[in-house]
Amino acid sequence: MNPSRDLQVLLVADFTADGFGALLRQGDEGPRIIPTVTGMAEAIPTLMQPPAAPGGQAWNAALVWVRPGTALPSLAGTCPAQDASERLPDEVAAWADILRRLAERIPRILVVGWSPDPAWLDSGVLSGGGGPTGALRLMEAQVLLSRSLAGVSNLTLLDPAPWIQSAGEEAWVASLWYLAKVPYGPKVFRAARSSVLRQLRRLDGSGPIKLIIVDLDDTLWGGTLGEVGWEGLRVGGHDAVGEAHADFQRSLAALRRRGALLAIASRNDESQAIEALRRHPEMPLRPEDFAAWRINWEDKAANVAALLAELNLGPQSALFLDNDPAQRDRVRGAFPDLLVPEWPDDPLQYPTTLARLQVFDPGPGTSEDAARTTLYAQRRAADSGRETFASLEAWIASLETEVTFEPLQPASRTRALQLLNKTNQMNLRTRRLTDPELTAWLEHPGREWWTVRVRDRFGDAGLCGILGLARTGAPGCLELEIADFVLSCRVMGRGIEEAMAAWATERAAVLGCGRTCAQPVPTERNGPCLAFWSERSGFRPLPEDPGIFHHTGNQPRPRPAGICCLPVALPPP
Amino acid sequence: MTPTDTALQAIHAGIDEVNEQLDPAARLPKAATTPLLGPGSPLDSLGLITFLAAVESHLRQTAGVRLPLATDDRLYAEPSPLATVSDFATFVAQLLESRR
């Protein structure tokens, strides 16, 4: 996120908050915070009579972090007062009144909720023979406060429990408290910073997230649809990964009921994807839960642009979730204002990662919110086709992709056969071979297999492709047939297919072949392969047989820009 | 890992901790001669306590040793072990050695 302006924030705390204020100032996500920190003894007077903001400016927000004993005298000390239950309602009402008046003077108020003092006796117990403990009374006070402030629309109560939980044993550091009156360890303050910055993000004009754009394969569901079919997708069932994906979808469904729009941007076959959403028995989300989708083999950033245009939303209102770091990078680069969080590799983390983003409007939502998706579905606008993103070529170049072609080695044979036998989408002929069958095929003179290894700035993707080549014809009119053209779906659509096609023509030139041919065999799942050969390969259909694509002549196809192909020069035959 | 290595690792962790709160121009380098206390150091009293607490925490987590550094009066004697990173590493290493 790029900050659009500085935010003057009054930080009111009853402890030494200078370090936390410095953390907020140094934060690099969201708007730039200029905190003014009150002295710890001045918290209550400051709340009742806030000072002027520095430089004659207006306050943009106030962050109030006051410990329970300060706001609620009956909970001060290591043990709540005997008559705490009787006094708490009045004390909470008085505190709420102070906050309400502050909210009338400063446009946005964040109030950190109360957490039990680590020095309280009866820690870990809510109630027992002696009646409710301080912790239970604190919960009661929290509920009372929340109800008292329900009508204050510019005030948000933050829950510090996740911050404290994330710090574990380091949540409270005795030396920091007794020497400096800092009640929490640095991990708590770091977690607090993230939450506060996300809340303050709205002051940037961003507002809460209104649109969640999700990828499908290994994001919304487990598995690659084109490889396993909808029946093989991992959603729900007696399967930890499937269960996590189902929980993730249920969270998205809950956000939809609260008014967020859901959309899909996926490189897939649209009809198969919609069928999966419709037919998979465990799928919590169905097609009607999505306001829009772009499911095709186009550039993902282009699809995101189209979705934003269709739904008439700016990128700052949208969130993009994709398990593929390259695609996240693509969308992030094309839309600097669109929130593209890092996404875990482990699907078991998806539900909690979504929850921790804290970029959605809290609350159960209204019936209008729930109907919003339907309204959008009913009045879909035409795609304006605005070019709002950086070029696909520039993004491909930024990946620093390195493609290495090697003759089939014994060490890579097993992996190569696995790839051949399980790849569907980018597979020229979808032929399946056993090891003996491959041996028999390679025994014929003029036949060879090349493996394709891919690495980029995100890491080494390993063996991702296969080129099977067969030289045919008589001397003087030799042809090189591409018998196998296979590429893992993980690296599709980034110029590697073009590199492989160009490589084949280079090999043809070295072998003295005047023509290179490829004859795709259509299947239910290799639509992307057919689309590549007809639209991007640079090969042309034979006039006498349009199902065969050829490149003829002594000059090989040029290698795609932005991709390093190795070796630089082909070995002689 | 030697006690000195352990001490330096913890001190560097402490420097990372305080640097997070400092403007880029004021951040402490992880050099042997970096002053931690006194005229050449950008750390105020809060910064120093934050640094020492972070060193204590790192030693607790990585070496399983509880060293109450922040309340150790020897740090404020003359000459102070906090004069430089190197001096402090020597001090902490001696404490670690004595705990073996």
Image (cartoon, rainbow, N blue to C red):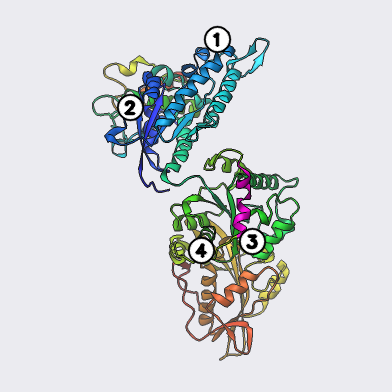
Is label 4 in a helix, a strand or a loop? helix
The subunit letter for the residue under badge 2 reads A
- The image shows residue A394 at horizontal and vertical percentages of 43, 64
- The image shows residue A478 at horizontal and vertical percentages of 58, 87
Name the mark on residue A302.
4
Circle nearer the N terminus (2, 4): 2
| On screen, residue B8 above or below A529 | above
Residue indicated by mark 1: A81
Instruction: Please name whichever residue, A123 or B8, is drawn nearer the observer in this view of the structure.
Output: A123
Q: Is residue B94 visible?
A: no
Circle nearer the N terminus (3, 4): 4
Q: Are marks 2 and 3 on the same chain?
A: yes
Is label 3 in a helix, a strand or a loop? helix
Label 1, label 3: how many angstroms apart (C-alpha)? Answer: 70 Å
Instruction: Please name whichever residue, A81 or A24, is drawn nearer the observer in this view of the structure.
Output: A81
Over which residues does the magenta segment extend? A365-378
In the orientation shown, which residue stands out farthest toward the top?
A82
Circle nearer the N terminus (4, 1): 1
Name the mark on residue A415.
3
Assess disc 4: are there few (<14), some (14-19) or many (≥20) residues with their C-alpha within 10 Å of its C-alpha.
many
Q: Is residue A469 left or right of residue B27?
A: right
- The image shows residue A568 at horizontal and vertical percentages of 45, 70
Disc nearest the viewer among 3 and 4: 4
Disc nearest the viewer among 2 and 3: 2
Query: Looking at the picture, which amino acid does disc 1 mark?
Result: Ala
Q: Are marks 3 and 4 on the same chain?
A: yes
Name which quarter of the figure residue B32 lies in. top left
Residue indicated by mark 2: A51
Is label 2 in a helix, a strand or a loop? loop
Disc nearest the viewer among 2 and 4: 2
